[in-house]
Image (cartoon, grey):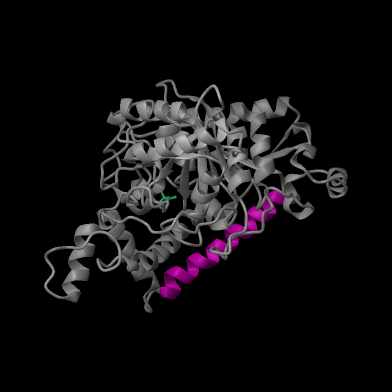
Amino acid sequence: MKTANKKVTAERLVRDALEKAKHFSDYNIFTFINEEGAILRAREIDAKIANGEKVGRLAGVPYALKDNFLSPDGETTASAHILGGFTSPVTATAVEKLEAEGAIMIGRTNLDAFAHGSSTENSYYGPTLNAFDRKRVAGGSSGGSAVAVALDIVEFTTGTDTGGSIRQPASFNGIYGFKPTYGTISRYGVVAMASSLDCIGFFTKTPEDMDLLMEITAGRDPKDLTTLPDYYNSIDRDSLGAACPSDTLRAALAKSSCSAEHIAPSESHRIGIIKDFDNESVDKEIRDALLKKCEMLKEKGCEIVELEMLSLKYALPAYYIIQPAEVASNLSRYDGVRYGFRSEKSADLDSLYNNTRNEGFMPENKRRIMIGNFVLSSGFYDAYFLKAAKARTLIIREYEKAFSKCDFILTPVSPSPAFRLGEKVNDPVAMYLEDVMSVSLNLAGIPGLTIPAGKTTEGLPIGLQLVGPRRSDKNLIKFSKELI
Ligand code: GLN
């Protein structure tokens, strides 16, 4: 990461990033540009550097925030009309940690409203365009964050991933996108979508940058009681778990300080590929890219293990029951009284709620609220929500079993490369099918990293997903270098 120093000032870095953001304004990447705030902050950091004071690991590094991270800089809208005009009094823990290391937020990035979607076309502000083909979608929901990194406006951006919202846009734009183990980074101060699935993560151009951002942001937060103790920076024997193949190695790790430097060389790794994914539904060029990477790993001494994971066929239906159920609960707080937009038409309290929600939510938000309330209703709870919860348990167990046979799993991120703008936006089921390979990780709480894996003949990026057991995050990022 290019940090500021006496020769290259933070102000220079920030001004360059702002300039690039302007240059690419046609892509509709940003919902807010923090020009004044970023320059002021850069000057503070430059003054520290000039005085020889200690600066952080991200001193002067410009970055952008997905617009569902709360901070008092600019409105936080989650690209939803109903949050228009809302300025947060609090700052997300992840943002605090990044800024404590000297990172400078130059803007907020576009997303599908409330992170509901796979293309950024559900944003109140209109879609973000793909970095490689402006007639195609950026992916979603974190489309703006992915394109900001792909076009080199900033070196990193934040994202949230509830069912693929980091991994899929990263894959559509040819960069790295990481969804950590559930609970690794605090969700405090991030607009909630589905609380048992939401994860905070990043977009970068290299695994090294991803590792640094994880080191900075991972850890327990008293403001989010679902956060894990900081295993990322102090890997213990258990946390390495299945990611370390041999017993000898485990014993060595147990004795050593267990730093990631002691991880096995690639030749001892076993990489799983899932044989029962419906291969025919995956684009041929993506399948070929996967096979090519497997060959590459074999040459490096890895063993390729075929996995049968029958319960994964239930992942998408289970996700599209559990997720809307949690969405319905989380979005009930937007009523026109406490946050952002309030409909002017309202004569009494009931019509204020109705009109605000009717005018303020996007159609996809409303669809999820309705599905969520339906599957939670007393007549249908057993038939839908309870069944989905059981399927989730099966999926968790199946992954545990898989990781007793291999160290990591390599899969496509999505069935196709970036699709055309408008192609799926009016067909919710087609859009949901985009998530068929990404949602099972959120249901199981396990980490997944999108790695760039070449391009299609049309020049569109292909991404593959490296999946690991819970808390294998550090090893997984490290191992991804074998796939470059
Ligand atoms: N595309 C998925 C959905 O619409 C995932 C969204 C996300 O991860 N925020 O639910």
Main SS of residues in magenta: helix
> Is residue 397 inside the magenta stretch?
yes
> Is residue 455 inside the magenta stretch?
no
- Left or right, residue 412 beside residue 467: left
Q: Nearer the viewer, residue 209 or 93?
A: 93
| Labels in figure, total | 0
Q: Nearer the viewer, residue 111 or 316?
A: 111
Residue 290 seen = yes
- Left or right, residue 83 beside residue 211: left
- Left or right, residue 420 beside residue 316: left
Residue positioned 59% across, 61% down in the render: 394
Can you tell which quarter of the image residue 337 is in?
bottom left
Q: Residue 170 at x, y = what percent?
A: 47, 36
Residue positioned 64% across, 39% down in the render: 477
Can you say which quadrant of the picture contains the N terminus? top right
Q: Residue 77 at x, y = what percent?
A: 32, 52
Can you say which quadrant of the picture contains the C terminus? top right
Q: Residue 269 at x, y = what percent?
A: 74, 37
Q: Which residues are magenta?
A: 381-404
Q: Residue 344 at x, y = what percent?
A: 13, 63
Q: Nearer the viewer, residue 63 or 413?
A: 63
Specify the farthest residue to the bottom.
378
Q: Nearer the viewer, residue 234 or 279?
A: 234
Residue 417 seen = no
Can you tell which quarter of the image residue 182 is in?
bottom right
